[in-house]
Image (spheres, rainbow, N blue to C red):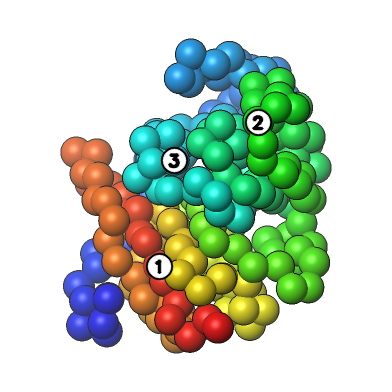
Amino acid sequence: MDPSQIAQLPPPLPPEQIIGLNQPRADLHTLRGYTWNGWEFEVPPGVFLPGATSRMIHQRILDDDIDVRGRVYAAMGAGLGVEAVVAGLRGAERVLAVDVHPASVAAAEHNYHRLVGPGGGSEFVPLVSDLFAGLPEGTRLDTVTFNPPAVSRPVSDDPDIVRNVCAGRPVTDAFFTQLAERDLLAPGGEVYFIASNTADLRQIIGHAADRGFTAHVHHLHDWDDGVLTYLFRLTRETSQ
């Protein structure tokens, strides 16, 4: 996207609409269940329950639309670990399940070993980290996915809800800044990043552009309630 295309991204919805559309579930701190692709998951307290936007990533990895085969793949904000499981089954060389929340990383590790097993062929790396801070120096990533908590208005004071829903631009800005400054994206690498008009799309993608990334709209979904969700594919040609 060039600056004129970024400027054409929709502005955030009105604050009251954003807040109304993102009311948190009351069961975050309880034990829940989740089913996808015939797999049953136990969701521990505090761990994010995947929603429809998360399934945009899960399904595309399963369908090879997001190709991880033979690649070093990082699932940022791994949560329950569904995309890490799919990546292992689709033949990623290495799967990094990264989350700032220790219980989420533990859940992702449990589910990976339960569903992929030791014969999966991928190296699995569970990592508790604030974005990329905990990655070893010299790490290069071929594919990164992130469905960030980019909602631009606070919907709760609960830190777990903020972490899952409405941390806003500080998280997305740091994500692209760290990727660029540490040169973490391998040559030919791709970032698949989800954001909607409940977030500051123009500022988020503008910041990514300032850090050398080129964004392409890989998929756009209209939920018929005013929300437009974008799955962006970003590349960075300056990576060496």
Residue holding disc 1 = 234
The answer to whether marks 3 and 2 mark residues whose Cβ atoms lie closer than 8 Å is no
Q: Quadrant of the N terminus?
A: bottom left
Depth order, front residue of 234/44: 234
Q: Is residue 136 visible?
A: yes
Question: Is residue 162 visible in this depiction of the protein?
Answer: no
Residues tagged 1 and 3 counted as in contact (Cβ below 8 A): no
Dot 3: what SS? helix
Earlier-in-chain disc, 1 versus 3: 3
Amino acid at the residue labelled 2: Gly
- Please tell me which residue lies in front, 5 or 115: 115
Q: Amino acid at mark 3?
A: Ile
Q: Position of residue 215 (x, y in %)?
A: 34, 70
Picture residue at 45% right of the left edge, 63% below the top: 190
Where in the figure is residue 175, as x and y percent of width and height?
A: 58, 68
In front: mark 2 or mark 1?
2
**In this rendering, position of residue 81 left or right of residue 69:** right
Name the foreground residue: 20 vs 98.
98
Q: N-terminal of the two: label 2 or label 1?
A: 2
The kind of residue on which mark 1 rests is: Leu
- Could you tell which of marks 3 and 2 lies nearer the N-terminus? 3
Which-is-in-front pick, marks 3 and 2?
2
Q: Residue at 62% across / 78% down in the picture?
A: 183
Q: Residue at x 29, y 56 (%)?
A: 218
